[in-house]
Image (spheres, rainbow, N blue to C red):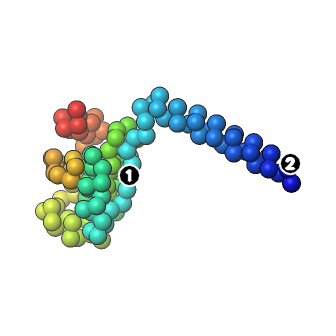
Amino acid sequence: MGRVSVLNTSYAFGLLIHMLIWCVAIEKSGGIMGKVVDVSDSDFDVATKSDDWVLVDFWAPWCGPCRMVGPVLAQIAEEREITIAKVNTDVNPLTSGKFGIRGIPALILFKDGEVVDRMTGAMPKQGMDSWLDRHMT
């Protein structure tokens, strides 16, 4: 019985050390960056007000340019402290209509729940970085 408890303590101590090393690595790398989330009509308001910077991507599965923009946005989420909120316009028509989305991909940048800027159409990563830098720096 005592031996099991020693093993469990050793395991817990090793796990704690591993977590501390991971936290130091995150701190040295600049912290945890953004994330990509799927958003629906019902949770759109919560998603856009829950983080400091939120970039909403209005897209559809059949849209070729949307499929090109997706990996670029995922890379941006890895590099910046921003939430990429993806709204599928085929299944979330209320939010798309509320913001007057007529063409996709359409991107709307929010800060603290307020619209900062919008952009329609695909663009390479360098262009997106430039567009975001104008607002986020």
Q: Quadrant of the C terminus?
A: top left
User: Marks 1/2: CA distance?
Assistant: 45 Å
Identify the amino acid type marked 2: Arg
Looking at this rendering, what residue extends furthest in the top direction?
28
Q: How many residues crowd around disc 2 within 10 Å: few (fewer than 14), some, or many (20 or more)?
A: few
Residue 47 drawn at (x, y percent): 30, 58
Residue located 36% across and 60% down the image = 38
Residue located 69% across and 40% down the image = 13
First of labels 1, 2 by sequence position: 2
Residue located 83% across and 51% down the image = 4
Residue 130 drawn at (x, y percent): 23, 34
Residue with the mark numbered 1: 36
> Residue 102 sits in which quadrant?
bottom left
Secondary structure of the residue carrying numbered label 2: helix
Identify the amino acid type marked 1: Val
Left or right: 97 as drawn, with respect to 89:
left
Nearer to me, 63 or 82: 82
In the rendering, which numbered label is found on residue 3? Answer: 2
Looking at this rendering, what residue extends furthest in the left direction?
100
Secondary structure of the residue carrying numbered label 1: strand
In this rendering, does residue 43 appear at all?
Answer: yes
Residue 69 drawn at (x, y percent): 31, 49
